[in-house]
Amino acid sequence: MKTTEPPIRVAAIGLNHPHIYGMTHAVVRAGAQLVAVHAQEDDLVDAYRKVFPQAERVADRRAILEDRSIDLVLSAIVPDLRAATAIEAMRHGKDVMVDKPGVITLEQLAEVRRVQAETGRIFSVCFSERFEVRAAERASELVAAGSIGRVVQTVGLGPHSIGLNPRPDWFYQRRRYGGILCDIAAHQCDQFLHFTGSTRAEVVASHIANHAHPERPELEDFGEVLLRGNGGSGYVRVDWYTPKGLGTWGDGRLTILGTEGYIELRKYIDIAGRAGTDHLFLVDQHQTRHIDCSEQVLPYGPRLLDDIRHRTETAMTQAHCFLATELALKAEAMAVRLAG
């Protein structure tokens, strides 16, 4: 979306998860002007500024919050601090994009909702497994076009690797990361709502476990959720079991079942041997085909910048953002722990 208006000015506060790079790229490639970064960790700032040298490091976050020319704050700070960071930014008149999980307790969610309503600012969680996955965007187009009829169910699988990069201490502290369903399954809750078109939903059942990491007692390495919405049903499975032989951090999959066909996304790898990422398989009443989505345009960043300018909700509605987050939090809160 090209515009002759002045660029949206952006700053980052908190770099503790590598998702901050995808979040930043999403808005910078859409035309935003990245101007500043604040984090306490020297190594994280140094690495970030190697990729984004235009971001001036500021020693005090207030330099960002009190700068009225800055429109949008990005944050991938430690999960238990994201709600407070977003609230502070919104109260200073900034729109906010946070990494998932945007919050880690229902109490934090209630406070973020209250402040967002009071301030009228945008609180957007970057659900990167949809917003930054080209195959997911192509699937959105196909579903909207009626290619598989009416969607009745989604099955979202979110396996992850624990060992592809060193994990900081907070990653293993339940009070800081929020639990596996709060964290990873937020992606699948977002996709369930999006593809079924559900505007109301509930958690039917959920489980968590630590099957393989007894030396890390606060880690949950397995989780599953059954969802029911006014547009369809959903099943979610997430885990930290990706084997080293896969060659990437996780075989993320999404199956979208319709009354006239189905779509399966193999987001990060096709284990049948096709190279690259963003594989989509479409089965309808006429054929079965593979679609390479590597050239698909990603609209989240441009739409968010347009929303900031015009106070619209084209990237994601605020209600959707909050409901996806709420489902993940409730799934975590009510989960039955399986024997490990």
Image (cartoon, rainbow, N blue to C red):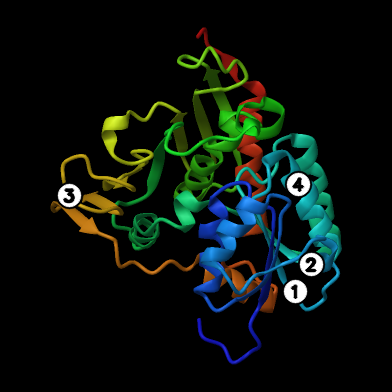
Disc with the residue nearer the chain's start (2 vs 1): 2
Circle 4 crowding by C-alpha within 10 Å: few under 14, some 14–19, many from 20: many
Q: Residue at x 83, y 56 (%)?
A: 88
Residue 293 in the image, given as x and y percentages of width and height: 28, 61
Disc with the residue nearer the chain's start (3 vs 1): 1
Determine the image quadrant of residue 138: bottom left
- The disc labelled 4 sits on which kind of residue? Ala
Q: Which residue is mark 1?
A: 70
Residue 121 in the image, given as x and y percentages of width and height: 76, 64
Give the numbered dot on residue 64.
2
* Horizontal side of residue 327 vs 121, given as left or right: left
Residue 235 in the image, given as x and y percentages of width and height: 44, 32
Give the CA distance from mark 4 to mark 2.
Answer: 17 Å
Q: Which residue is mark 3?
A: 274
Examine the rendering and report whether any part of residue 311 can be seen: yes
Q: Residue at x 54, y 51 (%)?
A: 19
Give the numbered dot on residue 83.
4
Of the residues tagged 4 and 2, which is closer to the observer?
Answer: 2
* Horizontal side of residue 257 vs 210, given as left or right: left
Label 4: element kind:
helix
| Placement of 137 over or under 283, stated as above or below | below
For the residues bearing labels 2 and 1, Cβ distance under 8 angstroms: yes
Label 2: element kind:
helix
Closer to the camera in the image, 229 or 293: 293
Disc with the residue nearer the chain's start (2 vs 3): 2
Circle 3 crowding by C-alpha within 10 Å: few under 14, some 14–19, many from 20: few
- The disc labelled 1 sits on which kind of residue? Ile
Give the CA distance from mark 3 to mark 4.
Answer: 40 Å
* Horizontal side of residue 271 vs 75, given as left or right: left
Q: Residue at x 26, y 31 (%)?
A: 245
- The disc labelled 2 sits on which kind of residue? Ile
